[in-house]
Image (spheres, rainbow, N blue to C red):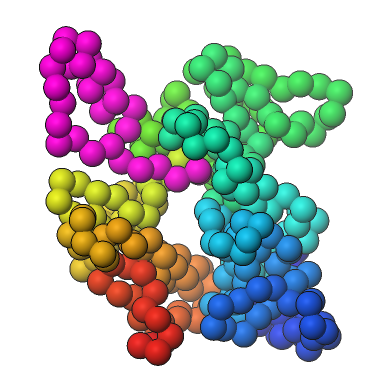
Amino acid sequence: MISSNLHSIQHIDSVTNREGDKCDTQVIAPIPRQACGPRLMCDKLEKKCYCVDKNGKRIFGTEIASEVNMTRLERYCNCSREYEEFPKTVPNGDFLRCLPNGDYDRLQCTEEWCYCMESENPDVIEVAKFNTSLKGLSCYDEKIHKDFDATFRSNCWNERNSLKQIIKKHEDQQIAVIGIDLPECDLDGSYAPVQCRQESCFCVDKEGNPFEGYKVPRHSKEGEEMDCRCVRDKFFIRQQKEKNQNMKDFDIYKCAPNGNYKPPEFI
């Protein structure tokens, strides 16, 4: 585990400065590659890393740089990267669940069973009946899994699935359903940053709560390009700052009305 203080990151940066050793970056100073892994793009000012695909495009998965686990670098972003390669015909929520950092959640569930993808004992396959207690499984983590309901589904998934069932029930009765927008869920089961209702799109946190002031017309250019990454990142860093006073908020970064980062020339 990397030390959480800034000095350790600066020390690694001073030791490793050969060309090609650093992570890809946008407009901010880089953290060395071995401090964040080949699948992660990092920035030193925010001390935050996020997953990128094989072309360097940002995808699902975020981690605080000081909390990157050096022993699991080869696993970071595996889940989100493989999802990007998966056929897009797979329904939302039917892919294996990822952790917020883009790794696979060790605890996975089917319609009938829950199981550990990685067992502490490789000679034992750990499974449990779907809606029985899962706390006996070695892969159950109270910090990660406490917010899932008894069916081990997230609030976003449950809301989405309930609406889909309502739509199907009406369609089976030959009743047309219009004007219902399903919530978009991220790979960890949380609400995706961008949600749309009727004629508007807006930014939300992982629990689905809207961020005030980040709402645009759905069919506008701002709505089509909306990713809400700026407002989500600011909220993420602010949460970390409350836990760790060494973290610095990135107030120099300004968000556009659609929650995206403003271009550097406007910062």
Q: Residue at x 33, y 61 (%)?
A: 226
Question: Where is 246 relative to 52, above or below?
Answer: below
Q: Residue at x 14, y 22 (%)?
A: 176
| 169 inside magenta stretch | yes
Question: Where is 4 relative to 223, above or below?
Answer: below
The spot of residue 22 in percent (x, y) is 73, 77
The spot of residue 45 in percent (x, y) is 56, 82
User: Hey, which quadrant is residue 173 in on the image?
Assistant: top left
Position of the C terminus by quadrant: bottom left
Front in this rendered view, residue 228 or 151: 228
Q: Residue at x 62, y 72 (%)?
A: 42
| 150 inside magenta stretch | no
Total marks placed: 0
Q: In the orientation shown, which residue stands out farthest toward the top?
A: 173
Q: Does residue 107 appear in this view?
A: yes
Question: Where is 74 relative to 111, above or below?
Answer: below
Front in this rendered view, residue 145 or 162: 162
User: Hey, which quadrant is residue 51 in on the image?
Assistant: bottom right
Q: Residue at x 32, y 33 (%)?
A: 160
Q: Which residues are magenta?
A: 160-188
The spot of residue 101 in percent (x, y) is 59, 54
Q: Does residue 132 appear in this view?
A: no
Q: Is residue 9 shown left or right of residue 89?
A: right
Q: Is residue 131 shown left or right of residue 101?
A: left
